[in-house]
Every structure is written in structure tokens, then in C-alpha cells.
Amino acid sequence: MASGQFYLSCLVLGSLGSMCILFTVYWMQYWRGGFAWDGSVHMFNWHPVLMVSGMVVLYGAASLVYRLPQSWVGPKLPWKLLHAALHLIAFILTVVGLVAVFQFHNHSNIAHLYSLHSWLGITTVILFACQWSLGFAIFLLPWASLWLRSLLKPIHVFFGAAILCLSVASVISGINEKLFFSLKNATKPYASLPSEAVFANCTGLLVVAFGLLVLYVLLASSWKRPEPGILTDRQKTRLKKDK
């Protein structure tokens, strides 16, 4: 039963994550004019797509690698490499998303990093960079002692979940900010809830739902990777069913 719930959650997560990305792409393509890489507002449109794809969806997927029952047995190194690689891809997408918005601001003579959204976003990216670097140095490279890994593991887990929460908050504030800027002089202002505003708000709700479900899977005790040599009864049942 627990195994079925886990894989059902993974199916829902995959669907929600795909919808988050597709909805963001559709918003930028249909209402905001599409994509380019020329410093124009169309270059900015890459920013929300890449941040949602990297900092939320791919980051959330990478966080759940150790929840797969297959990762509980056998060598741990392949799962470490997968965990690190997915996070690295997420970080690369995030950096490209930042390049898009900074070049757009430079091209349009817009100040950088003045809004709460930008402060929250850049803080999240810096924490992500520190988290990945520390994880690579301590948990992937073989030099760190077991006591050091045991000491830092709870901190690593906490900041992993915290960064996901900050990413979701950054996306929500970014959606709100984009709508305020784009619809403030429109014939249908944001307050009148035109179709673009409804669609973008729904996209934000999808992002929240995805983030909450990832956190639920991360916090569910029976879905956590067991300590070496220790399996709960429910975890043993899951492993037997998955063989």
C-alpha cells in the first residue's frame, strides 16, 4: 500500500511538474510574444520558464532521488551521482535564466536587484550554489569522515527543503510582479482579472501544489532512505513488493 502511494505521488508530481513548465511556456508564448535571445522583452521571457524548470521542477525531482526504494540497497554512489547531476542541471538552467533577465535589464536600462522578488530570488540562487558545493565536497568526494558527514547531513537536508520553499516563494512573487508590470496600463488591468491574469495565477497555484507535494514526500517517514542496516517494517514491505 505504501509503495503504491509512493509511485502514485511520483506520477502526480510528474504531471504537476510538466504542467508547471508547459503553462509557463504557454503564458510567455501566447500573451508575452514568445522567445528570443537579443536583449529584448522576448529574451526576458526565458527567465520565468528556466527558473520554474530549474529551481522548482528539476530541483524537486533531484531532491527525491533517495526516496526511490531502489536506492535503498546496493551501492550508494550511483544515486549520489544522479542526485548531484540533476541538481547541477537545475543550477545551470537557473544561471541561464538569470543571464536572460540581467541582459534584458541592461538592454532596457532597468535597475538590477531592487525588488523583493529579486532579493528573494538571488538569495535562493546563492544558497543553492553553496548547498551544491558543500554537498559535492562533503558527500560525494571521499575525503570527508563519517562523523563530519553525520554532523552536516541534517543541515544539508534542512537547507535542501528550505531552498525549495524559497524557490516556490520566488516564483510566486515573480508571477505577481510580472502581472503588475504588464497589466498596469492595459485596457484590462490586473484588478479586473483578464484571461492572462487568471492563467498566470493558476500557474502559480500549480507551482505551489508541486512544491507542497515534494515536501510531503520528503517528510513522509516511511519513504525516507533508511540508515545502513536499519529498515522499518513498512520499508521492508515496500522493498519486497518492488522486487
Image: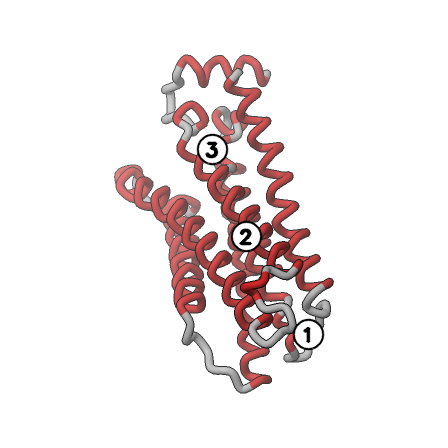
Q: Residue furthest toward the bottom?
A: 109
Residue 204: image tag: 2
Q: Alpha carbon of mark 1 to alpha carbon of mark 3: how far?
A: 37 Å
- What secondary structure is found at the residue carrying circle 3? helix
129 in relation to 150, above or below: below
Residue 217: image tag: 3
- Percent across and percent down for residue 241 are 57, 14
Is the C-beta separation of discs 1 and 3 under 8 Å? no
Q: Alpha carbon of mark 3 to alpha carbon of mark 2: how far?
A: 20 Å
Instruction: Single out the mark in the foreground, 3 or 2.
Output: 2
Residue displayed at 39% across by 26% down:
221
- Residue 4 can be seen, yes or no: yes
Residue 37: image tag: 1
Quarter-of-image position of residue 234:
top left
Label 2 is placed on what type of residue? Gly
Q: Alpha carbon of mark 1 to alpha carbon of mark 2: how far?
A: 25 Å
Quick one: label 1 or label 2, which is nearer the N terminus? 1
Residue displayed at 45% across by 26% down:
223
124 in relation to 159, above or below: below
Residue 157: image tag: none
Residue displayed at 59% across by 76% down:
185
